[in-house]
Image (cartoon, rainbow, N blue to C red):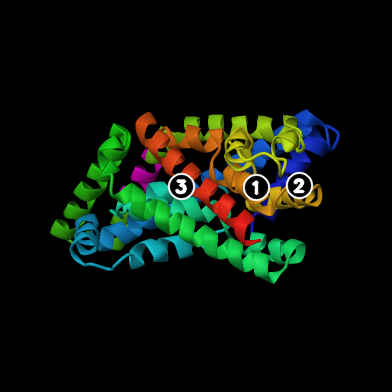
Amino acid sequence: MFDWIQQLADWVVFDTLHLARGQHLAEALNFFIYDSIKILLLLFVIIFFMGIVNSYFPIDKVRNYLSRNKLYGLEYLMASLFGVVTPFCSCSSVPLFIGFVRGGIPLGVTFAFLVTSPLVNEVAIGLFVGLFGVKITAIYVISGVLLGLVSGLILSRFKLERFLTPWVKEVLANAERDEEAFVAEKTPFLHRLLVIWQEVITIIKGVILYVLVGIAIGGLMHGYIPEGFFEHYMSKDNLLAVPMATLLAVPMYSNASGILPVVQVLVSKGIPIGTAIAFMMGVVGLSFPEAMLLKKVMTLKLIGIFFGVVSLCIIISGYLFNLIL
């Protein structure tokens, strides 16, 4: 779907700037161009689409339905499963997170998506089957979905909406005002699009600096941190290998497809598969660039709580993998 963006990034870096493939600067710059265009496009499309949806399905009705009707956790499972079919990395999941919050979806349900989306997708599943077989793939997919579901349920108990930034609260308030005006005036569709377009531009202006800085950090990590840099911390004799692997993964940044070959190398060198997968989950589900993007929508306290809960779930998953496999 994004092949043309990769071709554009390759053309700029390798054909126009004449940087050599494999060079640290070239890889970092290529990553920055590709992810910047991809994420900004996703941000535009998702917020515009959610604006149209919200103009006909008011935020308060969505919120009231989800709060008054007991779905017995089904909404968390649905959000987690939706994360499986969206092939995004942790940073490109953030635009959907903003769209969900703007759409009045409860924060815990939104977190369930945000956790699962970078961890499990159809590309990663295909690679997992080829590298590790059907059994391990099935366990991984189930654990990824459960990780999102459990994290969302835990985070929902903390009533974390108060830790959203004033910017998000203002975006939400503007959306509610627009919807009330649409309903009261029975605004035609084309006129609604003009209001929605203005809101999209306002939101993108508010987050673009955070997006670019976050991707720049990710590009530097992608281009300059050697893939085997942390391997000696994950030996099978180290009882703390799983939490160390999870924490050491945070400075790195990749998607599930990009890190899977590294996981295969780690396993082939004798590192327990649970430890290697915990490392992979840490790389794709927790990262400094993601935290930088989330800083626009969450306070530092909320980011810390989110990262803490997800880290704990990943560590537990890693130990369980090592026991089962």
Q: Please name which of the two marks, 2 or 3, marks the residue nearer to the observer.
A: 2
Identify which amino acid the numbered label 1 is placed on: Thr
Q: Is mark 3 on a helix, strand or loop?
A: helix
**Measured from the top left, where is residue 220 in percent x and y?**
67, 30
Q: Residue at position x 39%, y 45% from top? A: 200
Height in image: 11 above or below 154?
A: above
Q: Residue at x 66, y 65 (%)?
A: 136
Q: How much space separates mark 2 and mark 3, taking CA atoms?
A: 32 Å
Pointer 1 local density, CA inside 10 Å: few below 14, some 14–19, many at least 20: many
Q: Is the magenta stretch mostly helix, strand or loop?
A: helix
Question: Could you tell whether 97 is left or right of 156 in the image?
Answer: right
Name the residue nearer the viewer: 298 or 323. Answer: 323
Q: Mark 1 points at which residue?
A: 275
- In the displayed structure, 287 sits above or below 150; it is above
Q: What label does residue 246 carry, if any? A: none
Please give the range of residues in magenta. 195-202
Q: Do the residues labelled 1 and 2 touch (CB within 8 Å)?
A: yes
Residue beneath disc 3: 95
In the shown orientation, is residue 256 left or right of residue 303? Answer: right
Tell me what residue is drawn at x 76 percent, y 33 percent.
226
Amino acid under disc 3: Pro
Residue nearer the viewer, 160 or 216: 160
Residue 223 is a magenta residue: no
Give amino acid for label 2: Leu
The residue identified by callout 2 is 266
Say what secondary structure mark 1 lies in. helix
In primary-sequence order, the first of circles 1 and 2 is 2
Q: Is mark 2 on a helix, strand or loop?
A: helix
Snapshot quadrant of residue 131: bottom right
